Image (tube, rainbow, N blue to C red):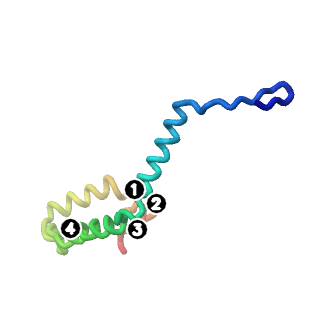
Amino acid sequence: MAESDGIKEAHNKIPRGWLIFYISLIVWLVWYIISYTPEISGWSYYKIYEEEMKKAQAIKVEIPTENPYEHNEKAIAEGKNIYITNCAVCHGDDLKGGVGPDLTT
């Protein structure tokens, strides 16, 4: 043991809890590198992105392009009432915006 200014340096073993932590960290690191390196595991965000885009396209195809309420006066009146109650504060009575974005474009 070295001694300097009355301070003794002891070479004690690392505490068991720290040793378990370090070993666990190394094991986790190896697992993480193997699991999330695309060259090793083949896993990639691009695959998930492509799957999500395919699902979105399938849903988009199912959305009707025509307004089903175009000739329904009652639905139009209800929609106008809902807009005035909830949306006009930010988007304005003329849909031109203000605080909220312009809805006419």
| Disc nearer the start of the sequence (2/1) | 1
Residue that numbered label 4 is attached to: 59
| Disc nearer the start of the sequence (3/2) | 3
Tell me the residue at 24%/70% (across/down). Answer: 54
Of badges 4 and 3, the one in the foreground is 3
Residue that numbered label 2 is attached to: 99
Residue that numbered label 3 is attached to: 39
Q: Are marks 4 and 2 in contact (CB under 8 Å)?
A: no
Find the distance from the CA under tag 2 to the CA under tag 1.
8 Å
Q: Amino acid at mark 1?
A: Val
x and y, in percent, of residue 1 in the image: 76, 30
Of badges 1 and 4, the one in the foreground is 4
Q: Are marks 2 and 1 in contact (CB under 8 Å)?
A: yes
Which element is circle 1 on? helix
| Mark 1 neighbour class, 10 Å CA radius: few under 14, some 14 to 19, many 20 or more | some
| Mark 2 neighbour class, 10 Å CA radius: few under 14, some 14 to 19, many 20 or more | few
| Disc nearer the start of the sequence (1/3) | 3
Which element is circle 2 on? loop
| Disc nearer the start of the sequence (1/4) | 4
Q: Amino acid at mark 2?
A: Val
> Is 45 left or right of 98, judged from the image as shown?
left
Q: Are marks 1 and 4 in contact (CB under 8 Å)?
A: no
Find the distance from the CA under tag 1 to the CA under tag 4.
32 Å
